[in-house]
Image (cartoon, rainbow, N blue to C red):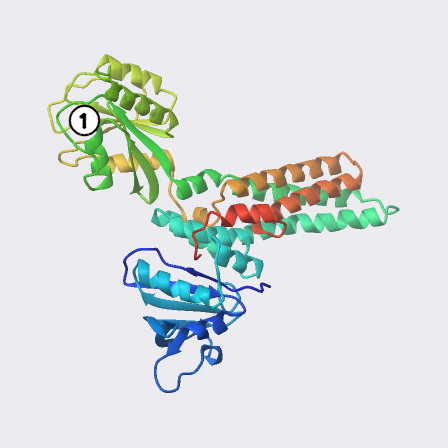
Amino acid sequence: MFEDTIAAIATSIGEAGLAVIRISGRSALAIADQCFVPAGKARTPLREAASHTIHFGRVVRVGRTVDEVLVSVMLAPRTFTREDVVEISCHGGILPARMVLETVLAAGARAALPGEFTRRAFLNGRIDLTQAEAVADLIHARSELAMQAATEQLEGKLSLRLRAVREELLTPLAHVEAHIDFPDEDIAPDTREGLASRFGQARLQMDALLRTAKEGQILRQGIRVAIIGRPNSGKSSLLNQLLGRDRAIVSAIPGTTRDTIEETANIRGLPVVFVDTAGLRHAENEIEAEGIRRSREMRDRAELILHVLDAAAPLAEDDLLLLQSEDRRPHIVVCNKSDLPRRLEFPSPMNLVRVDVSCVTGQGIEALKDALKEMIWSGAIQAEMLQVTINARHFEALTRAREGVLAAKAALEAQASLELVAMDLRIALNALGEITGQTTTEDLLDRIFSQFCIGK
């Protein structure tokens, strides 16, 4: 489908054992032949090589050896892009990879745009749009569950569910359009009832997919959790315990944390973005005041709050006011310093989720992780949940499809014009097609694939 041949470094830039330069397109083999000198006496050109074979030799430019390499030859259509693909494995490092790429570009390839290899795989029918998005999700996965969900989508599990919904709508549309073409034959009441029933089935299937939007957002983006509390309550120590390493400075001097610190941790398979904040108190100087302002801002933006209290001290008035202000927001009260004699008491009645921990001994940290997981994702995380977790784009298109189905069902039951029923069904089908890429626009493709890294 494409006249030009693209190339890019497919591995991360930096010092490493290996780097891979990927070439895809009609002239991939011819371009690689200009750069590659095979080792040995036979020296068979790459364009004569069998598919899925590896060849040892040198990349040469203007008579000078650039690097010793291994070249993988993969012939269309059994490749990721369904085009001829050549991958050159050279020594890792910024300079070797860049020089090999420059040699390939000088031989006639064009530098690939972000996500262009995956875009060609989609446009050549190798994958649909949900599978293309799964490639990016897989690369950016920050937990094993996120990786599993991306893998399930890459295997086409979501696509199968969407195809089933489309089938529930295509048959009724065919019936309706047949009656539009032959207006003398009115739809029988039982037929009308059967069509309305299929609309209801399609709506139920879409509702089930729409309910996975929250879980999909959590797996892909994580959830922001603000760690707040008074100075010296142990917020930074708690962050270090949750991360399993020393990330924040810990000191007995109150007010050590002056700015917010963000770090992502894998909590029971879920990506959680913890934000350590400055201690909330009356500021003693301008710098601390700015830190406290940022703390309050992060608290307001967070989806969940860990309110750290000193269990070895009485409940302060400021802490009580904070607890009362958080009463309607998801939060967990973390009673730190549980290894010391307890002096902390709560006025009753206060409906709080409380966990006792000691950031010195590590006691209670696992229980806190369990409480976090239950508050973020209540119930067991089952494999079937991960198969169809939709993203924001899918949610918006599915919502439009659902509205179209409801409108078609209402029109059919009200015995409105069949042209209106057919129009609403087409709206629903087009919205479903946007998800998989059966109906799409260049702007949509640009928006999706621009988020990919170059080389993928």
Q: Quadrant of the C terminus?
A: bottom left
230 above or below 132?
Answer: above
47 above or below 248?
Answer: below
Name the residue furthest right: 184
Q: Position of residue 211 (x, y in %)?
A: 50, 39
Name the residue furthest front: 62
In the displayed structure image, the side of residue 375 where residue 180 appears, left or right: right
Q: Position of residue 140 (x, y in %)?
A: 39, 48
Q: Residues within 10 Å of mark 1 (few under 14, many from 20)?
A: some
Q: Quadrant of the N terminus?
A: bottom right
Residue at x-position 59% and y-position 52%:
163
- Amino acid carrying mark 1 in the image: Thr
Q: Quadrant of residue 397?
A: top right
Residue 50 seen: yes
Residue toward you, 109 or 40: 109
Residue 127 seen: no
Q: Position of residue 148 (x, y in %)?
A: 40, 52
395 above or below 106?
Answer: above
Residue at x-position 34% and y-position 84%:
40
Which residue in the protein does label 1 denote? 256
Q: Position of residue 313 (x, y in %)?
A: 15, 19
Residue toward you, 64 or 71: 64
Looking at the image, how many numbered discs can be counted on the residues?
Answer: 1
Q: Quadrant of residue 403?
A: top right
In the displayed structure image, the side of residue 278 where residue 59 appears, left or right: right
425 above or below 313?
Answer: below
Name the residue furthest top: 317
User: Label 1's element?
Assistant: loop
Name the residue furthest bottom: 41
